[in-house]
Amino acid sequence: MGIRPEQVAKYLKDHPEFFDEFAELLSSIQVPHPYGGRAIPLSERQVLALRERSRALEGKLRELVQFGEENDTTSDRVHRLSLALLAAPDLAGLLQAIDISLREDFTIPEVALRLWYGAGDSHEFEPVSEEARVFAEALGTPYFCDRPMFESGAWFSAQGVDLRSLVYLPLRVDRPIGLLALGSPDPLRFTPDMGTLYLVRLAELIGMALRRHLGP
């Protein structure tokens, strides 16, 4: 019965002094090149492995830096939205601030808001179906989809027919007060695998600001 490769590997791992006794062996061992059929010295193969690991770490670092920069940008936008909500003098000004901030600062192509708490003469207070209210009041987290839900397609502008990714945000404080829908023709703009932290904070900020202007 021959020696198995696992036994050789275990022996070398358990006896690191082996290569002290047979130092010349390291320079003579040839192993397959990872990207070709030719054989190369073991030392060269180790250098290649270290370079690959270094490139992988550099890629991870770039991802972390990019993620941090994107977070900083989003955080700044949320801060500016918060200031705009606080500065709104009345309900009309608040609704305008929400729409402008989401469309221009957050560059969201389509924004639709419907409220069933309070009263007003703007389109945000137009009647919604019972299905829409039940859907919104049952939501605990942002809901992503690739086409408008129930009758909400009619809430958007004429360009709303081309929406390919949407997210619905329930608005509530101590009770459900409405639903905010964000849409884009880009199928990758709003997807279930994206983070929801800032979306939840947006809904909380907007909900609380609306609640303050809608009355007790």
Image (cartoon, rainbow, N blue to C red):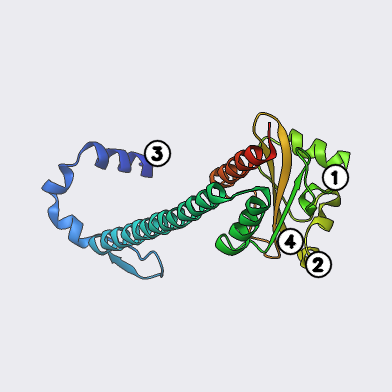
* Mark linked to residue 95: none
Q: Residues within 10 Å of mark 3 (few under 14, many from 20)?
A: few
Q: Earlier in the sequence, mark 1 or mark 4?
A: 1
Helix, strand or loop at mark 1: loop
**Residue drawn 72% across the image and 37% down it:** 177
Helix, strand or loop at mark 2: helix
- The answer to whether one can see residue 190 in this image is no
Under mark 4, the amino acid is Arg
C-alpha span from label 1 to label 3: 79 Å
Q: Earlier in the sequence, mark 4 or mark 2?
A: 2
Helix, strand or loop at mark 4: loop
**Residue 118 horizontal side relative to residue 172, left or right:** right
Q: Which residue is mark 2?
A: 158
**Residue 46 horizontal side relative to residue 38, left or right:** left
C-alpha span from label 1 to label 4: 22 Å
Above/below status of 143 relative to 36 = above
**Residue 83 horizontal side relative to residue 49, left or right:** right
Q: Residues within 10 Å of mark 4 (few under 14, many from 20)?
A: some
- The answer to whether one can see residue 87 in this image is yes
Residue 43 spot, x, y in % from top left? 23, 61
Above/below status of 94 relative to 36 = above
Query: Closer to us: mark 1 or mark 4?
Result: 1
Q: Which residue is mark 1?
A: 128
Residue 48 spot, x, y in % from top left? 30, 63
Q: Which residue is mark 3?
A: 1
Q: Which residue is mark 4?
A: 164
Query: Closer to us: mark 2 or mark 3?
Result: 2
Residue 184 spot, x, y in % from top left? 69, 62
